[in-house]
Amino acid sequence: MTSDRAWIALIVVWAMVQVAWRFAQGPALELDEAEAFYFARNLALGYNAQPPLYFWLQWLVFAVVGQGILGLALLKYALLGTAGLLLYAMLRRLRPPFEAGVAVMGLGLLPQVLWEAQRALTHSVLALTMALLVMALADRVLRGPGRAGLGAWAALGITAGLGAISKWNVALLPLAILLAACLRAEWRARIDPRGVMLAVVAAAAVVALPFWWVFRNPVVAGGSLHKLGIDEAAPLWRMLAGLGSLASAWIAFCGLVIVVGGLIAFKLRGQARWRPDPQSRLMLVTMGAGAGLLAVGVVLSGVTDVADRWLLPIAVFSAPVFVLWALDSLGPLGGRWLARGLGALWVTGFALLPVSGWVEPGYRAADFAGLAKWIEDRHSDAAVVSDSIWIAGNLALVLPDRPVWRSVDTPELTGAVLWVARQGTAQALAATRGKTAAPAGGHPLRRGGRREAVDLAFSP
């Protein structure tokens, strides 16, 4: 059996190698990377529709290692490595090292973790880490030796608050855990009303200032609400469309778990019914409670378009629960084959990451160095303003000594400005800020297999 030390070393080394591997994926920034780079240059209570915790952590990393791709990769893979260590530590309370380690590898069955989290995501990576930390603390509170003290409840509340300001949908997880705890007598007996109240107060204290910023900036904070697909259709149609989209999101998120689980279940048909251990039961009941809360929320809100990544704080537990079931059902030999298969998944994902930078959408292969040289040669003293967070973040990276702004964040402009438009014309972009500008032509910007052009205009 593999020891704790070996599994911990494997997770840590994987995260460290991924930091170096990021540099093989292209010199430019992905969409979420560009957003993080752009906003994390400064501290603020809020930035956009995303909560601020990731940008705060990125600012701190930049303060230590400097602003660049290294700082971006360090934070992301430190968070992913921490997520793996948290899940491993929680499962080790009941499981031997091999089973806990293979359950961590089981996260590779989730495309949002194996591929999207490594390739592009930022806030969702932090949400994954915080969700696993919330569950680990809840497992201590609901199953630990003796009745949990107020300190444990306060820690759970603080973590829940930090989870909410990592990504707003993480706030669903503690609600689902509380509902799950109320559904079973052995967990219900562990609920301390004073502890719950303290946890609520602690969580509220953590989210107070970011929520105050949201209240003061509703237009900016609500900038992504259109993604929910809320429309004026008939109530019955909205309900059916929303629940259908929610079901599709679950299938997309857990599809590989469902397929592999179905194949194993078919092979094992006729065997005795699986009896989940207490941790697996807690994760299963929490997922069920979370699914119910999501369904109620979809119906009441009129949401008709649910993205699979929004399910991450709840659905992420499907993978470790599946692996624990498979290990219990397949026996030692089947468990070793499962571990090999999961290892092959991770190696394949690792090997393909550089390809994602050079094929469609190919954001990391974009030639911002050429655009930066053009700007330096012709408009060396101008501030740069763009309508695209992707362009603004990348130009801020390659032009570190120049003021680079996104148009909606631009302060009062008094000097020369170069306008860079990804959509429409640069002259129209200047007009939105009350400026007149002369056309400066277009500049090609290769992006993977696609060639697009940005439009340029200059205000002296």
Image: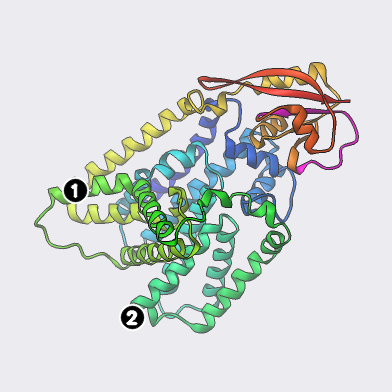
Residue 98: x %, y % from top left: 30, 51
Residue at the front extreme of this rendering? 234
Residue 185 is labelled as 2
Question: Is residue 144 visible in this depiction of the protein?
Answer: no
> Amino acid under label 1?
Ile
Sooner in the amino-acid sequence: mark 2 or mark 1: 2
Image-based side of 289 in relation to 366, left or right: left
The C terminus appears in which quarter of the rendering? top right
Image-based side of 197 in relation to 7, left or right: right
Q: Is mark 2 on a helix, strand or loop?
A: helix
Residue 387 is labelled as none
Q: Does the magenta stretch include residue 417?
A: yes
Q: Distance between the residues labelled 2 and 1?
A: 32 Å
Q: Is residue 218 magenta?
A: no
Residue 5: x %, y % from top left: 40, 49
Residue count near mark 1 (Cα–Cα under 10 Å), binned few <14, some 14–19, many ≥20: some
Residue 28: x %, y % from top left: 61, 28
> Amino acid under label 2?
Ala
Residue beneath label 1, please?
Answer: 264
Residue at x 79%, y 32% (from the top left corner): 430
Front-lying residue, 190 or 300: 300
Q: Number of labelled discs?
A: 2
Residue 316, compared with residue 408, is above or below; it is: below
Residue 329: x %, y % from top left: 18, 55
Residue bounds of the magenta highlight: 409-422
Residue count near mark 2 (Cα–Cα under 10 Å), binned few <14, some 14–19, many ≥20: few
Residue at x 70%, y 18% (from the top left corner): 442
Instruction: Tell me if label 2 and label 1 are in contact, CB under 8 Å.
Output: no
Question: Is residue 77 visible in this depiction of the protein?
Answer: yes
Image-based side of 113 in relation to 265, left or right: right
Front-lying residue, 325 or 181: 181
